Amino acid sequence: MAVDVKKTEAPKGKESPAYTFVPVCRSEELAEGEVRQLKARGKQIAVGRLVGGQLFAVGGRCSHMFTRLGKGKLRGTLLECPWHGAQFDVTDGCVAKWVQRPWWLKLTYDAALPAFMKRAIPTYAVREENGEVLVAVD
Ligand code: FES
């Protein structure tokens, strides 16, 4: 199901100081299939590398109860929250699965939570330069 996503990509063709790319780690610190919790301009972000080498950067806090998503597991393009198992697609920040555990919490949410409350996470532009990973945050 599509959920509203707040995109934070740098405007194309513009050098806006509000979207400056900032270095967050060395390229070799992110192996394929790995995700890390990092900080950029004071914001918690989860930065990782998909199998195949593509980098991604998303908001570092789960939209359910704000757990660190950088401590979660990558399953293809889905990033699973380490606490209750919600899954977010790192390509667009959308919710793929909402809370999965414990079973009674999943049942409660499935029965009572309106879809619009299953909030997406922000996505950020990311690139590699001179052996460093850079993320654009406002
Ligand atoms: S805190 Fe992430 S699913 Fe609950």
Image (cartoon, rainbow, N blue to C red):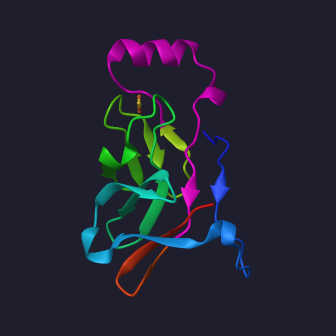
In this rendering, is residue 22 above or below 74? below
The picture places residue 86, in percent across and down from the top left corner, at 42, 34
Q: Residue furthest front?
A: 42
Would you say residue 125 sits in the magenta stretch? yes
The picture places residue 26, in percent across and down from the top left corner, at 31, 74
The answer to whether residue 137 is left or right of residue 12 is: left
The picture places residue 109, in percent across and down from the top left corner, at 50, 17
The answer to whether residue 114 is left or right of residue 111 is: right
Would you say residue 79 sits in the magenta stretch? no
Q: Is residue 10 visible to the viewer in this orientation of the structure? A: no
Residue under the point 66% across and 50% down: 6
The picture places residue 76, in percent across and down from the top left corner, at 36, 56
Residue under the point 72% across and 72% down: 11
Q: How many labels does the image show?
A: 0
Q: Is residue 26 visible to the viewer in this orientation of the structure? A: yes
Residue under the point 52% across and 59% down: 41
Residue 129 quadrant: bottom left
The quarter in which the N terminus is drawn is top right
Residue under the point 63% across and 21% down: 114
Q: Residue furthest bottom?
A: 130
In this rendering, is residue 21 above or below 120? below
The answer to whether residue 29 is left or right of residue 77 is: left
The quarter in which the C terminus is drawn is bottom right
The answer to whether residue 136 is left or right of residue 29 is: right
Q: Residue 53 or 11: which is nearer the viewer?
A: 11
Q: What stretch is highlighted in magenta?
A: 97-126
Q: Quadrant of ligand 1?
A: top left
